[in-house]
């Protein structure tokens, strides 16, 4: 059987997982693929890092260049992470015409266009199934499974840490800070949690999916991003009473066909790309995606509604995706078809990201107000002045103290109008804290 | 751009869907794939069949051979259905070295081995994403996405008609016959519903998935199959009270690692393959797959638990899968890699299907008994004699009449023991109707 030699960079969690999976299932993969993946070298930070999976010293080196440039290495797996040296590693391999498999979403988000161009230029290929939603084969589904579909909607729960925190806040009625501290203690959240909880990791992933789905490179700077730091126990509780679950969603909506048809052709390639917490109706499949699981909901104009669910991170799920890419890379080498499915096809050159100010949605609004008649009238007047409609109001009883919560559910309104109205509401003397605004997704 | 000429057989629902999808999204597919699919001829039963999608007469013929043998046709899509002429159509195309795309699960189930052998022999390829779970790219996920995984468990809700009926029985508290009649009126069920409700359609699909996952051809005659015809409103009601939802499941369980390790190596390739209604815990994702949606739950030894969800049938979802296969076929022709991913790789030559009598599971048992003390003692004695343990008993109040229901939840027991015990219970004079036995899945 033909053999393809693999050089790996990264002897940490993901690298160890790939090493273990190849050791245990390498024969199975070879018999299915008709080509064997032979790991010949692993570059790690040090020989004696603490590892859950033991890697023999004979396989290790601390010199990544010697792996990439090794004359027998035909495929490179970049599993080191980071956005500086990792970029060099991948570019070095591509320049040598060696295909690269990576799990590095932060790097792809920051330098995807450059890396994809290099792959094209040097006739190598770049595979990145593991970069989004771990073991879920969502890249393959979007690029190959749904190749005949215009992707009308895509919603992703793509950060396991946030989903874990939100699930526990809901189930235990706990506050964000307490659950975060506990998650850090248990290893579910990083000591420096900002990448996860402020939505940046979700942004990296959703930018990659949006680019793939719509065929133009989505500049991460154009992706509106809100995290879950400001959500309170109260919000999950009120959302629950109203029949919703709060999830941090990556959102990709094709305007045009669905929304902008009347606005004419020039707007037909507008796509909303954003990350924000949202109220999801309990009856929707995404509401039941709990704990650290990930899921991506995809609506294609031909296939209709679909969902892909699984573990979005961790040693083994990520290794599963890397093995899938390695098999594709090995087949492409075997058959000399390195550009069969390019990393990125820019098929919609004049696509644009919808400015968030123009995005329209429904909203949940929680105000802290003084407990006195006439407050609602003042708030309602501000909303009316901004042409924003209220669909329902909850003034829960049983809250004592200087201020009480006031919940408003708001009809479809442009983000710009909501932002303006919130500024005015915040200046009302009866309002005692910054308003909390969470979007409501109806999946239409 | 390179072009691949398509000849299609079938001008009905699926054929019309593929025609429409190619017309509307053919340019998009071409720009993504780098190869264009050009439909040159469609063989239909008649020129003037009633069609939801209009197909120009200039494209139509009633002579399928003229399409398959057309010198310019490079790929054939068999969308005619049936298991006799369709077999000829596919074999004729393969013998000419033309790759074939099919949505025909009944044919694959009956003649898969022969068709796959023909594909190998003539160096063509056979693609069948549309044959299982409609628009869900589950074939691609199993073959490519999870190529590095041993598939430990696979559970499929793969028949939309049954899932629709069970959902309505649960939601409306309705009886099977009434919902079936209504589903027939609405077009959700066939006038002759046996293929769906007796589980045969699920059997076709689950056999294909089991074969792919485990690398040996699963003879459909070895697949134990029970349908949903005997389920009563009462069963869905009691299941609900106990925290379960009843679903018709296709079940593929790898014995060995999980169950048979102690039994030694000779049993390590045993796989349970079956179709039966089962109690699914409400907390499991499969319980929330409702109405006509399909879903396939896959547990790989590397990736962990995953779920794929979407529409399992219908014109457009099926067309989406056909387009995906057509793109793969076109790329394989463009790059002359017709055997890159063969239709079936027999990588586990000595795999065997576990005889159902040896399968172990938990059970829900509903008896109709006379309303008199001592009945439970008699039933329990029979179970004890067969070494079957009872985990709980419900004797609901408020049922009047000659017989009352008695519900028993049974611990893990071999199917053989349960069958024997049920025969003995059925002969007890206090038991007034044939016992209803439904398996309970715990997804362990």
Image (cartoon, coloured by chain):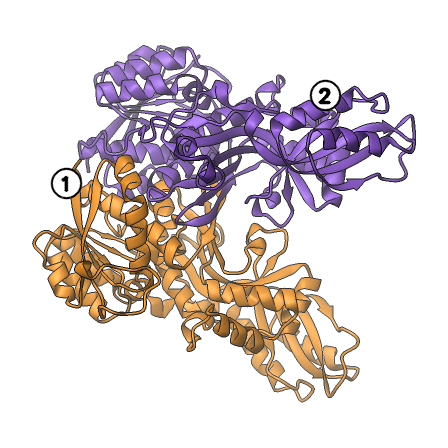
Chain colours: A purple, B orange
Numbered mark located on residue A357 in the image = none
Residue B336's label in the rendered image is 1
Q: Percent from the top left, x then y, of residue A276?
A: 60, 29
Residue A350 appears in which quarter of the rendering? top left
Quadrant housing residue B282: bottom right
Q: Nearer the viewer, residue B47 or A172?
A: B47
Question: Percent x, y for residue A64?
Answer: 35, 13
Answer above or below: position of B380 versus B101: below
In the image, taking residue A216 as reference, residue B279 lies left or right, namely right
Q: Is residue A77 left or right of residue B439?
A: left
Q: Residues within 10 Å of mark 1 (few under 14, many from 20)?
A: few
On the image, the x and y values in percent for residue A93 come to: 28, 17
Would you say residue B260 is visible in this rendering?
A: no
Identify the image quadrant of the N terminus of chain A: top left
Q: Is residue A99 left or right of residue A395?
A: left
Residue drawn 41% across the image and 39% down it: A137
Residue at numbered disc 2: A423
| Residue closest to the eye, B205 or B44 | B44
Element class at badge 2: helix
The subunit carrying tag 2 is A
Label 2 neighbour load within 10 Å: few <14, some 14-19, many 20+ = few
Residue appearing at x 48%, y 40% in the figure? A153
């Amino acid at each position: 059987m033909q053999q393809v030699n693999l050089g790996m960079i990264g002897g940490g969690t993901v690298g160890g997982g790939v090493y273990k999976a190849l050791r245990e299932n390498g024969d199975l993969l070879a018999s299915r693929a008709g080509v064997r993946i032979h790991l010949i070298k692993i570059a790690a930070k040090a020989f004696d890092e603490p590892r859950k999976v033991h890697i023999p010293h004979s396989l290790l080196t601390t010199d990544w260049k010697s792996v990439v440039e090794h004359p027998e290495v035909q495929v490179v797996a970049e599993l080191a992470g980071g956005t500086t040296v990792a970029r060099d590693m991948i570019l070095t391999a591509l320049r040598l015409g060696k295909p690269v498999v990576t799990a590095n979403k932060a790097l792809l988000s920051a330098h995807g266009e450059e890396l994809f161009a290099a792959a094209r230029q040097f006739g190598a290929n770049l595979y990145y199934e593991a970069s989004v939603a771990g073991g879920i084969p969502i890249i393959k589904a979007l690029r190959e499974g749904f190749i005949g579909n215009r992707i009308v909607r895509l919603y992703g729960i793509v950060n396991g840490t946030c989903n874990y925190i939100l699930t526990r806040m809901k189930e235990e009625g706990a506050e964000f800070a307490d659950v975060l501290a506990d998650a850090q203690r248990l290893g579910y959240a990083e000591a420096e949690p900002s990448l996860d909880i402020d939505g940046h990791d979700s942004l990296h992933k959703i930018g990659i999916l949006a680019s793939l789905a719509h065929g133009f490179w989505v500049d991460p700077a154009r992706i509106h991003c809100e995290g879950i730091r400001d959500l309170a126990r109260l919000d999950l509780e009120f959302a629950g009473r109203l029949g919703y679950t709060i999830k941090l969603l990556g959102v990709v909506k094709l305007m045009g066909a669905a929304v902008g048809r009347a606005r004419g052709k020039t707007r037909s390639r507008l796509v909303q790309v954003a990350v924000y917490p949202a109220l999801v109706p309990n009856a929707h499949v995404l509401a039941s995606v709990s704990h650290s699981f990930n899921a991506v909901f995809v609506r294609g104009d031909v296939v209709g509604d679909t969902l892909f669910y699984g573990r979005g991170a961790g040693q083994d799920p990520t290794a599963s995706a890397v093995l899938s890419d390695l098999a594709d890379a090995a087949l492409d080498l075997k058959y000399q078809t390195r550009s069969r499915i390019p990393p990125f096809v820019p098929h919609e050159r004049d696509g644009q990201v919808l400015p968030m100010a123009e995005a329209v949605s429904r909203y949940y609004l929680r105000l802290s107000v003084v407990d006195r008649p006439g407050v609602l009238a003042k708030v309602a007047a501000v909303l009316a002045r901004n042409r924003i409609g209220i669909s329902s109001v909850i003034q829960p009883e049983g809250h004592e103290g200087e201020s009480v919560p006031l919940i408003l559910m708001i009809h479809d309104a442009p983000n710009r109008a909501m932002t303006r109205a919130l500024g005015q509401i915040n200046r009302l003397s009866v309002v005692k804290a910054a308003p909390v605004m969470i979007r409501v997704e109806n999946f239409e």
